Amino acid sequence: MRILRTWLLAAAMLALGSAAAGQSAPADAWPQFRGTAGLSGVSTSQLPDEPQLLWTLEAGESIDSSAAIADGVVYVGTYSGTLVAADLETGEQRWTYEASKEMGIGESSPAVSNGLVYVGDLAGVLHAVDAETGEAAWTYQTDGEIKSSPVVTGDVVLIGSYDAHLYGLDAGTGELIWKFETLNYVHATPAVVDGVAYFGGCDEVFRGVRVSDGEEVFSVPAGAYTAASATTSGNQAYFGTFNNEVIGVDLASKEQLWRYEHPQRHFPFYSSAMSVDGTIVIGGRDRMVHGIDQATGEGRWTFRTRARIDSSPAAAGDRVFIGSGDGRLYMLDLESGENLWDFDTGAPLSASPAIADGKIVIGSQDGVLYCFG
């Protein structure tokens, strides 16, 4: 009996560990915006205590797109309309793909799955590109610009559009499976939990749409225009709004858990939140990074930069990485918010860091892609 109890305990601990690991990006990849389909923003990769600049790549025009990393290759979009693939170790360019010369690639960040790279452009087109060759596999035209990032779950790729729809497309062929209509732009990237895509909208509603058929199964008022993507932790979601608040929502009860607003500085949140070790971390247009108690919604710490923060945080271990409009990439202590290291790129950083294989990758608004490790 004692042996059985020991075996069951070990199995339970293994299951818990696997569940926890599933909420974080693997150590060697960051295959989409925020690293995982749940938009965790957390990596299991080990990073050096004092990161060093390893390489830079002149990618062309401004980079608002956050990088994806898979199989030793970095993928990022630029405002010149180019999707760039570069070697993670050396920074050597592998190929480029021309998406939209007229409109460019804005904040939409690539997603990599089953040999294809997906990215949206400001002309409203979702592109699927062969990850090895850079050749087009298929495209799908929406009726509004795309700033949302694609999320691949199973054989479905999800994408939001400024035509007020969230789309579910066949990831292999690009054929429309369903589309869900909201009342305004779909700017945010959906976070997928247990087969449901959760996203806030510019119609001031936080929704859940079933991935299999596009049916709405969840809806709560957000009370404000929401451009930021939500992060998820278990059955909870957290996101910032243009009403200067960060909101916690229980996905099971469909009730708001709490609302956080800084007591003195009241500015919108455009950055997407991150949940790690009981702390919600988010950047604000008040120039500060906020650390919030996940259970209570009470502020734990703030760190002030020199400009607004639209970049979304990423974490590895007990350290948080985030860019600022002041041109610096910061490494903060998760517990205290203390600045442990920073690097001045000389140009605003609105893209978000990607972490994989002991490296941090981020693009700047002067078109340079940086890799640290």
Image: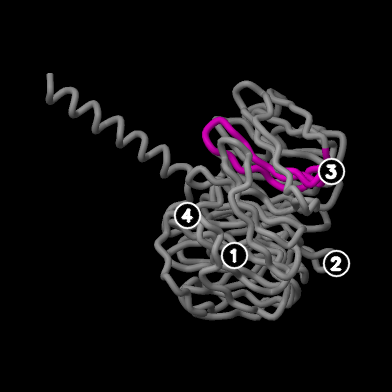
Q: Which residues are magenta?
A: 224-245
Name of the residue lying farthest toward the front: 264
Which tag, 1 or 3, sits closer to the chain's start? 1
Q: Residues within 10 Å of mark 1 (few under 14, many from 20)?
A: many
Q: Give the residue type at disc 1.
A: Tyr
**Mark 4 vs mark 3, CA separation in Å:** 30 Å
Q: Which residue is mark 1?
A: 75
Nearer the camera: disc 4 or disc 1: 4
Nearer the camera: disc 4 or disc 3: 4
Q: Give the residue type at disc 2.
A: Glu
**Mark 4 vs mark 1, CA separation in Å:** 17 Å
Give residue 43's mark.
Answer: 4
Corner quadrant of residue 108:
bottom right
Q: Give the residue type at disc 3.
A: Tyr
Which tag, 4 or 1, sits closer to the chain's start? 4
For residue 150, side relative to residue 62 (left or right)? left
The percent position of residue 91, horizontal first and vertical second, equals 53, 77
The percent position of residue 190, horizontal first and vertical second, equals 67, 41
Q: Residues within 10 Å of mark 3 (few under 14, many from 20)?
A: many
Question: With respect to residue 271, does 330 lie above or below?
Answer: below
User: Residue drawn 47% across and 54% down?
Assistant: 43
Name of the residue lying farthest toward the top: 1
Q: Helix, strand or loop at disc 2?
A: loop
Nearer the camera: disc 1 or disc 2: 1
Which tag, 1 or 2, sits closer to the chain's start? 1
